[in-house]
Amino acid sequence: QVQLVESGGGLVKPGGSLRLSCVASGFTFSDFYMSWIRQAPGKGLEWISYISTSGGVIHYADSVKGRFAISRDNAKNSLSLHMNSLRAEDTALYYCARYGENNYWYFDLWGRGTLVTVSS
Amino acid sequence: EIVMTQSPATLSVSPGERATLSCRASQTISSHLAWYQQRPGQAPRLLIYGASTRATGIPARFSGSGSGTEFTLTISSLQSEDFAVYYCQQYNNWPPWTFGLGTKVEIK
């Protein structure tokens, strides 16, 4: 079954850290570019980070640059997001998403998300 | 950064009627536009890419059109499962990949 499953969300205090994980199954993970996308409660979608197939190219949204770090382990079919210096405005449902086959830059597969709440 | 503007914010439609959703890009994006459907409590689902190509398994009642800066998603005859929020996303200039704020299609 082709799927992405996120984990690692939870309640964290402002200034704290959290590590999110996404495990892929049912497809060759190492062939696909990946991203993290978040959705604040009742709000729209915000792309926050991208990683190439090898991990050699990484991009971040300005809103998280310098605080978040994306990585992947192709041997374990996993994607990670290390989040530091968390703020209240980082509260959101965090999705991992796969880019389309043949390097198309839309998102053709999404996980169900993991909720991050930043609050004292 | 390319800003995507969707209209209307909310669209009230009766089952069986046609729904027309709009998406405008702040600069030309060719046909590098995708549409997603998000049902309550669910992850987004890819509907359309390349402005007009339906993704695998998407019913023919969903169609996309447009190029440049103006795009349209049409749902020809709304079914109960189509009441959801719809997002457009550009992938012509990145990073960042940008989404519109969404159009909620609700039952009239």
Image (tube, coloured by chain):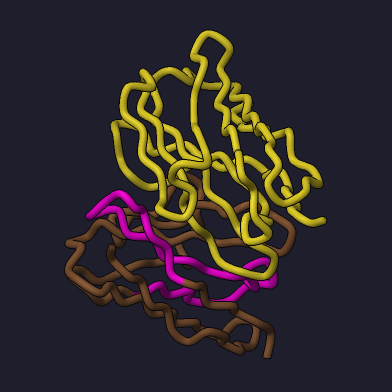
Chain colours: A yellow, B brown
Seen at 28% across and 55% down, the residue is B50
In the image, residue B69 sits, relative to residue B53, either above or below, namely: below
**Would residue A85 appear left or right of B55 to someone viewing this image?**
right
Q: Nearer the viewer, residue B27 or B41?
A: B27
Q: Is residue B80 magenta?
A: yes
In the image, residue A88 sits, relative to residue B9, either above or below, namely: above
Seen at 61% across and 32% down, the residue is A4
* Residue B72: x %, y % from top left: 35, 75
Q: Quadrant of the C terminus of chain B?
A: bottom right
Q: Nearer the viewer, residue A31 or A89?
A: A89
Q: Quadrant of residue B88?
A: bottom left
Count of numbered labels shown in the rendering: 0
Q: Quadrant of the N terminus of chain B?
A: bottom left
Q: Quadrant of residue A26?
A: top right
* Residue A20: x %, y % from top left: 65, 33
Q: Nearer the viewer, residue A78 or B14?
A: A78
The magenta region covers B72-100
* Residue A99: x %, y % from top left: 41, 38
